[in-house]
Image (cartoon, rainbow, N blue to C red):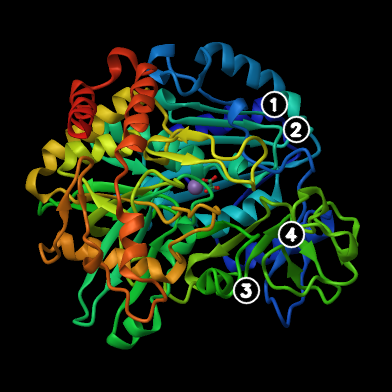
Amino acid sequence: MTNNKTVLAWLDEMKALLTPDNIVWVDGSDEQRDELRRLAVELGELEKLNEEKLPGCYLHRTNPNDVARVEDRTFICTSTKEMAGPTNNWCDPKEMYEKLYNIARGSYKGRTMYIIPYSMGPIGSPLAKIGVEITDSVYVVLNMLIMTRVSTKVWDVLGDSNDWVRGLHSRCDVDPEKRYICHFPEDNTIISVNSGYGGNVLLGKKCFALRIASFQGWKEGWMAEHMLILGLQNPKGEVHYIAAAFPSACGKTNLAMLIPPEYLRKKGYKVWTVGDDIAWMRIGEDGRLYAINPENGFFGVAPGTNEHSNFNALESTKKNTIFTNVALCEDGTVWWEGLNKNLPENAIDWRGNPWDPAKFNKADKTTCAAHPNSRFTAPAENCPCISDEFNKGAGVPISAIVFGGRRAKCAPLVYQSRDWENGVFIGSAMASETTAAAAGAVGVVRRDPMAMLPFCGYHMGDYFRHWLEMGKKLGDKAPKIFNVNWFRTDDEGNFIWPGFGDNMRVLNWIIDRCEGKATASETAIGYVPQPEDIDLTDLDMDLDTLKDILTVDKAVWEKEAAEIEEHYKKFGDHLPAELRAQLDTLKANLK
Ligand code: OXD
Ligand code: MN
């Protein structure tokens, strides 16, 4: 398969450590995929779904102790603790290798070692990178075949190079006490043990494409971000690209696949999806910032996905999709809370037990048929609005970067930063409020800079510095930076802005600002549109209501500034002076 000495040496080391009974080189062919699907069904790892209604689709149930990413067991193992910074768990690499090798030693005995060569990004693209994951799980192989580009061509592109990321996954005993997701950014290595849940084991995704890649980007002068990428096509046929970062549960996949309101569709507006979770961005020859989506599929949250909230995502799951921890219906189809109002009779819940719809209580997650973090792994090529640029390696030029979060009273519907530095300040202070959907108190503000808190592979203060440096290199070609908040509420706690497809109205203002076509008023926090600047055609909303969600309440923002000051303290002397100065400017503006 490959003569690459660095690959072969690592595989020899891993074979000696893990002692598999068999070795299978994954080649990305349909024949091998079909064979692995049959095997997974035979092993009980997958259940085949209704071939007529959901061709090529399968269901998987994880161990109930293993249903989500585990941030408290995720480590960045850099040579010094300072390098990993205050927001990451850290362990000395030598100590962690020893601990993990002791856990993994002999763990493939009686199992097969699958060797998966994959490309993050179109194979051979100058923006792409290569990884090799070894795993003892057929489920992981089948998911990687959807989420990344797996092919023998990857070996050809790699040649003799040592620029590839090593990924070791071993299910071991799925013991939560011995579960570790560890990153060694200085060695381009990831080790994940005792989990079988996607976010912990599909090593191309969060582990490589964000944690390792953010470190690589820092060293090599590019950016790996937790961002969707969409193309907004206007009636002239021009497409402008936006990259947007939101913390989990703020609707990134929905925005990425947005369907514009009817009156805009009729005029010829359209949204194209390039990516829904991760963007890798580099400065192109013309000096602009170009982005690719390094992934090849969507690992989306199923509950809440329906034909109204996200028609395109739902369509993407209609073939060749793997569902994890959703409910299984009598007719071999799947169901989850929020799919529709037809609670299925005689369904099997995500734990594999019969589910009684009469006992279902929306407010009690333990009565759900599907796990709240149940997922679909769907090929991007299934998405009806996938961009033509998705498979092209050159990337798309980014006009605007958008940050956002869930804030009931604070941030206005949309505002534009004064410049790149001010935009980095906005991103660094990004926050979201907890909802009733999560355990714990409602309305607690969690700071999540650039939505990268769980995914930044080095000191976050240095990460902010890297953003500032990128801005200097981009100069006047830099994308404009905005912030949006779809979640302002009225006194009864109801959302005021309709969201979903109507967010297109805000995106249009953003693009018009990039083109110098729209007006705005300067406020203490940046440029906010006047109510007349947002098109409300066909929307049941008056200008006064819109004005309400565009206001910047000084008292609220004074409290916000004090909280940002507190948040900044943890970065110590790694916090760039420019950002401290930005905070001082905000405080002065609020006076
Ligand atoms: C995800 C996440 O799964 O951000 O994409 O948690
Ligand atoms: Mn994500």
202 to the left or right of 386: right
Q: Which of 153 and 320 is in front in this view?
A: 320
234 to the left or right of 310: left
- Distance CA(mark 1)–CA(mark 2): 7 Å
Question: Which mark is in front, 3 or 2?
Answer: 3
Secondary structure found at label 2: loop
Q: Mark 4 points at which residue?
A: 326
Task: Residue at 63% x, 52% y: name it.
Answer: 141
- Say which label, 4 or 2, has the lower sequence index: 2
- Distance CA(mark 4)–CA(mark 2): 24 Å
Q: Name the residue under label 2.
A: 172
Q: Which of 481 and 190 is in front in this view?
A: 481
Task: Residue at 61% x, 70% y: name it.
Answer: 306
210 to the left or right of 281: right
Task: Tell me which amino acid carries mark 1.
Answer: Ala
- Say which label, 4 or 1, has the lower sequence index: 1
- Distance CA(mark 3)–CA(mark 1): 35 Å
User: Whole-percent x and y of residue 293?
Assistant: 38, 55
- Say which label, 1 or 2, has the lower sequence index: 1
Marking on residue 319 = 3
Marking on residue 104 = 1
Mark 2 and mark 1 in contact (Cβ < 8 Å)? yes
Question: Which mark is in front, 4 or 1?
Answer: 4
Task: Tell me which amino acid carries mark 4.
Answer: Val
Task: Tell me which amino acid carries mark 3.
Answer: Lys
Residue 10, above or below 58: above
- Say which label, 4 or 3, has the lower sequence index: 3
Residue 113 found in image quarter: top right
Neighbourhood count class around disc 2 (C-alpha, 10 Å): few under 14, some 14–19, many 20 upward: many
Residue 350 found in image quarter: bottom right
- Distance CA(mark 3)–CA(mark 2): 31 Å
Label 1 CB less than 8 angstroms from ligand 1: no
